[in-house]
Amino acid sequence: MSKTNTVIRGRAMAVSAAALLAGAALAQESTDPIKLTLHDWTGQLITTQLMGDILQEAGYNVEYVQADYLAQFAGLETGDLHVAMEMWETTGRDAMDAATATGKVENFGPTGMKAKEEWWYPTYMKEKCPGLPNWEALKDEACAEAFSTAETAPKGRYLGGPVTWGGFDDERVEALDLPFEVIHAGTDAALFAELESAYQRQAPIMLWIYAPHWAPAKYEGEWVEFPEYTAECYTDPAWGLNPDMAYDCGKPFGEIWKVGWAGVKDKWPGAYAAIQAFTIDNAEMGAMITDVDLNGKTVEAVADEWMAANEGRWKGWIGQ
């Protein structure tokens, strides 16, 4: 089925799904909108737009709903929200596990992308803190002061992501007794605007960088190497270097998952199969994020280009 100009993104489709369905099986499914959640970073907006476009091509009604990354699980459990296309192993595993344990939320499988999120610094800062990337170098007062600003001196400044992203950076600083103050960026855009500004001036900066993203490719730098993550580090204070506190380790690395309301498979079985089949890799996503954040393209335009270039692939996901 070819894409039409009548598709209106960002709201529920007004066209009856039954009129667009490619097969008799889909005609038996609900015409209610499938609600996909939108968060506050470019990659997730792209992933969600792609999934929405694919479902619309299959004849489903789609609605995009702005939602908090972690708090969205309340809506997914009740069925008020239906699909979240990116739940990162690095920051969302606990919330996802708690939700799936209720039986009301289901893990729809990996997206194919691998997540890495950690403290990151430009290579030029190693002159002032030569013990890096070993995290213990950050305990040195001179090193911490090299990363300080007027608002944090003599403590170092760590620019974390928006508070809604989680990540336990404040807890990590306390557990590892780091002479740093955590300052949270208000938005994803603000986080990377500050990196751009600091890098151009060769100014001190330590911040949350994640992949897949364009920043680790554009800028020369390294991630801090903290004690290796284990599940016990987050749940058992007795584990690790600090016997009295949890989070005395780095962040986990791993999959980026698709999750959603457990009722999707019964209400929209064809959509459920397509969501499970959806897969994309870090290289593809990194290129699309670059097109949006650096080259000025819209999320919708980037999604259109991907859909046109991968028609045979996504049509297989919807059984066409």
Image (tube, rainbow, N blue to C red):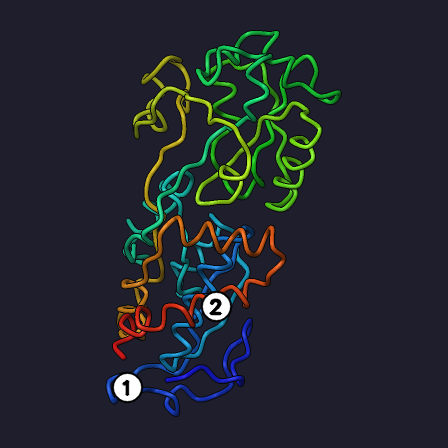
Label 1 or label 2, whichever comes before in sequence order: 1
Q: Measured from the top left, where is residue 224 in percent x and y?
A: 46, 23
Q: Position of residue 119 (x, y in %)?
A: 50, 28
Q: What residue is drawn where x is 67% and y is 30%?
A: 198
Instruction: Give me the disc on residue 305.
Output: 2
Q: In the image, 250: left or right of 215? A: left
Q: Residue furthest toward the bottom?
A: 19
Q: Position of residue 271 (x, y in %)?
A: 32, 72
Residue at 25% across, 77% down: 319
Identify which residue, 136 or 298, lies in the foreground. Answer: 298
- Going by the numbered disc 1, the residue's amino acid type is Gln
Front one among 279 and 97: 279
Task: Choose top left, top right, bottom left or bottom right for residue 58.
Answer: bottom left
Can you say whether 316 is above or below 235 in the image?
A: below
Q: Decide if residue 89 is on the left or right side of residue 210.
A: left
Check disc 2 and give the amino acid type.
Glu
Residue 49 x/y as whole percent? 48, 65
| Residue mark closest to the camera, 1 vs 2 | 2
* Secondary structure state at the residue bearing disc 1: loop
**Residue sitting at 55 percent across and 16 percent down?**
126
Q: Quadrant of the C terminus?
A: bottom left
Residue ID at (63%, 38%): 185
Residue at disc 2, secondary structure: helix
Q: Which mark is residue 212?
A: none
Residue 28 tag number: 1
